[in-house]
Amino acid sequence: MRLPGLIDPHVHIREPGATHKEDWDSGTSAALAGGFTLVLAMPNTQPPITNAATLDLALAAARSKAHCDYAQLLGAGPDNADWGRHTGLLLQAAGLKMYLDQTYGPLRLDDMTLWQEHFKHWPKDRPIVAHAESRTMAAVILMAAIYNRPVHIAHVSLKEEILLIKAAKERGIKVTCEVTPHHLFLPSPPSPLPISGEGRRGEGRFEVRPRLATQADVDALWQNLDVVDCFATDHAPHTLAEKDGENPPPGFPGLETALPLLLTAVDAGRMTLDTLVQKMVTNSRKIFSLPEQPKTWVEVDENDRYEIHASEMHSRCGWTPFEGWQVRGRVRRVVLHGKEAFKDGKVLAEKGFGKNVRARG
């Protein structure tokens, strides 16, 4: 089976600042192994990507290491909302990320007057992505209505959220949204849940933001798939030592498990293959104004049934919350820009082969 190159609009590469978790080399290797030929990187790195200097830092690393195509989002901070003065910077960015709820890093904005400044000054033809949960999400949808501009809601996880987005869309508010595979397939576990070892180790491996929700919330996401615009992994790698530590950081790796999990759902009749392509390619390209990738496709053996094992993955973090899951559909080959980039478990594209789809000229 041949699919178009997949797009992941929500990936944490961890470079600069935390390359022991992931970098542009390992992260884009994992992307190709998962069938993704284009990833959009989040800005909550160390330092955060909030201005020309930090954007150049991230893009320089990507330029030398990325195996697949990419673009970098900027982060909204308390003192960088004067976007009208930085036209060149805007043209280089995939969009603006606003962290309005619990997150990992220093970019959270609690003051709604700061939200307003970003909504006023960020151009309407460039996407705003909001990490906004529950009532905060309701507030940012109101902001989108007030300023008559699009907003994309990241990683929706709750029944109340998907139903509110449905109601907002029905009233013509310019809102789109994404859902992660872990929120579709992993309801909140009982606590504690020892995956291996004792006590906190199991709990830490299920720390994620937004948190895993109830089975009723998971069911509501499946029942309202037509409201969901995109599947996004929110690939957020941390090492096992960090996840099993006293203060486990939130986040899961996801680039290499998303497609097989979703193809297994297709096989089970939970959605169609056309729906998968729409939510993993077509809609992301439209929402983020991404260019076509010529001579690019993914070859999948849809009949290959196997178990997910982190030991076979390319992500640097070395674990997955889906360890041992039975899935169907293995990526065999990826062709990017007419060249073989991945085949049978091996990344063939060289470092730096990936293109910045927001590069000027």
Image (cartoon, rainbow, N blue to C red):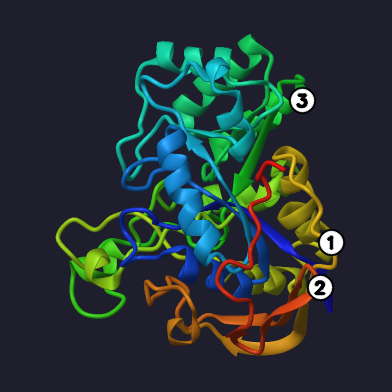
Does residue 245 lie above or below 312 as drawn?
above
Q: Position of residue 336 (x, y in %)?
A: 74, 70
Mark number for residue 294? 1
Q: Is residue 283 left or right of residue 259?
A: right
Residue 133 visible: no
Q: Are marks 2 and 1 in contact (CB under 8 Å)?
A: yes
In the picture as drawn, the residue positioned furthest to the front comes out as 361
Q: Which residue is mark 2?
A: 338
Q: Does dot 2 land on a helix, a strand or a loop?
A: loop
Alpha-carbon span between mark 2 and mark 1: 8 Å
Q: Position of residue 350 (x, y in %)?
A: 59, 76
Q: Amino acid at mark 2?
A: Gly
Q: In front here: 343 or 340?
A: 340
Res. 101 image quadrant: top left
Q: Which residue is mark 3?
A: 170
Circle 1 crowding by C-alpha within 10 Å: few under 14, some 14–19, many from 20: few
Residue at 77% x, 25% y: name it. Answer: 170
Question: If the image is split into quadrants, where does the N terminus sit?
Answer: bottom right
Residue at 69% x, 32% y: name it. Answer: 166
Q: Is residue 275 left or right of residue 253?
A: right
> Of marks 3 and 2, which one's residue comes earlier in the chain?
3
> Of marks 2 and 1, which one's residue comes earlier in the chain?
1
Q: In front here: 18 or 86?
A: 86
Alpha-carbon span between mark 3 and mark 2: 41 Å
Q: Does dot 3 land on a helix, a strand or a loop?
A: helix
> Of marks 1 and 3, which one's residue comes earlier in the chain?
3
Tag count in the figure?
Answer: 3
Alpha-carbon span between mark 1 and mark 3: 35 Å
Which mark lies nearer to you, 1 or 3?
A: 1
Does residue 241 lie above or below 129 as drawn?
below
Does residue 339 lie above or below 103 as drawn?
below
Q: Position of residue 48 (x, y in %)?
A: 37, 40
